[in-house]
Image: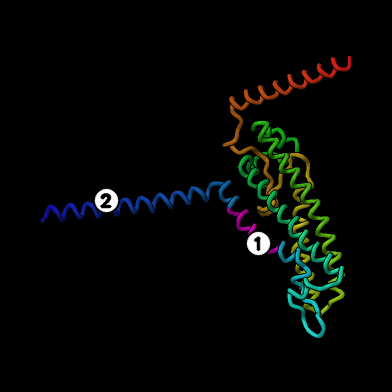
Amino acid sequence: MSNHTNEHEEIEETGSHESSKKQLSLCDYFKEKQNDQDFMQKVNVFLTLILEFYRVLMGAFLIVFVPQQCGEQACSMNENISRDDDLTKVAVSLNSITMAMFLFLYFIEVKRENKLISYLEVNNFTALDNKSVGEALEKISTSKKEAIWKLDKHYQNIGYSSTISFLLNAAISSVVIYNHYLDSKTVTVYLTNLLFMGSKVYDVYSTVNTDKNIFYSAYLKNKVQFNDVDPDKLISDEDNINDLENNSEKKDDDESNESDEIVEAE
């Protein structure tokens, strides 16, 4: 009986020890993640993105959410979008196009942000200028550099396109809303929603209107600039060899094509 009791106590002690060990390891894991720059930046991006979606929803669908007058009373959302006049139809279409443009902008924006977080890092002890960051980029492989530049260029293009869409949408929607003015709430909600989107447009413009190697974060506060290479992505000797082989093959192909063109010309 005594032996059974001792065994039972040992099992309980072992289970308790393992449980406390698991709790300790989870605490250590979260503490480690809190000190992980990449992890904390991605969490910040996710939380900010939720608020961004609300902002673009209210800022794009001006016809839907701004109070307007229908006869002697306020229009319902359905009445706002189901009018028969051509101008309202155009405005509603522009609302939808603007929403689609900004959703695509966010898609590119998040891809760019994750790429920057994965490949680069914020280093307060290195220079921030275009030339210095370009020199830092030499520490990673050519394919990674080109992936960063390509996404940054896509983000710039969709940023400018979204800005044009926003301006057109605001202009046409303003006319429709003015024609169906209700009361002071019309102006208040209209200006608030416009500022929602306008502040986003300004953020995008200030992020993309930079030199080639200046990579500002689209989500982190105070316009954090990624100016150094992530230690995990430093180029290895194998990457160097692969880049040299790829460049050599590309050069050989170019020379072969030039020779073929000369022969055909003769």
Element marked by disc 1? helix
In the rendered image, which residue does mark 1 sit on? 51
Pick out the residue farthest to the bottom.
Answer: 72
- The magenta-colored residue range is 43-55
Expressed as whole percent of the image width and height from the top left, the position of residue 162 reads: 78, 54
Residue 95 vertical position relative to residue 29 in the rendered view, above or below:
below
Expressed as whole percent of the image width and height from the top left, the position of residue 170 reads: 83, 64
Expressed as whole percent of the image width and height from the top left, the position of residue 139 reads: 64, 31
| Residue 154 falls left or right of residue 263 | left
Kind of residue sitting beneath label 2: Thr
What residue appears at the point 63 percent right and 25 percent down from the top-left corner? 242
Q: Quadrant of the C terminus?
A: top right
Element marked by disc 2? helix
What residue appears at the point 82 percent right and 66 percent down from the top-left corner? 91
Of helix, strand and loop, which mostly describes the magenta segment? helix
| Residue 43 falls left or right of residue 163 | left
Q: Are marks 2 and 1 in contact (CB under 8 Å)?
A: no
Residue 261 vertical position relative to residue 12 in the rendered view, above or below:
above
User: Distance between the Cα atoms at labels 2 and 1?
Assistant: 46 Å
Q: Which mark is residue 159?
A: none
Expressed as whole percent of the image width and height from the top left, the position of residue 197 reads: 76, 62
Q: Which mark is residue 14?
A: 2
Kind of residue sitting beneath label 1: Leu
Pick out the residue farthest to the right.
Answer: 266
Q: Is residue 170 magenta?
A: no
Q: Dot 1, how many residues are within 10 Å of its Cα: few (below 14), some (14-19), or many (20+)?
A: few
Q: Quadrant of residue 199?
A: bottom right
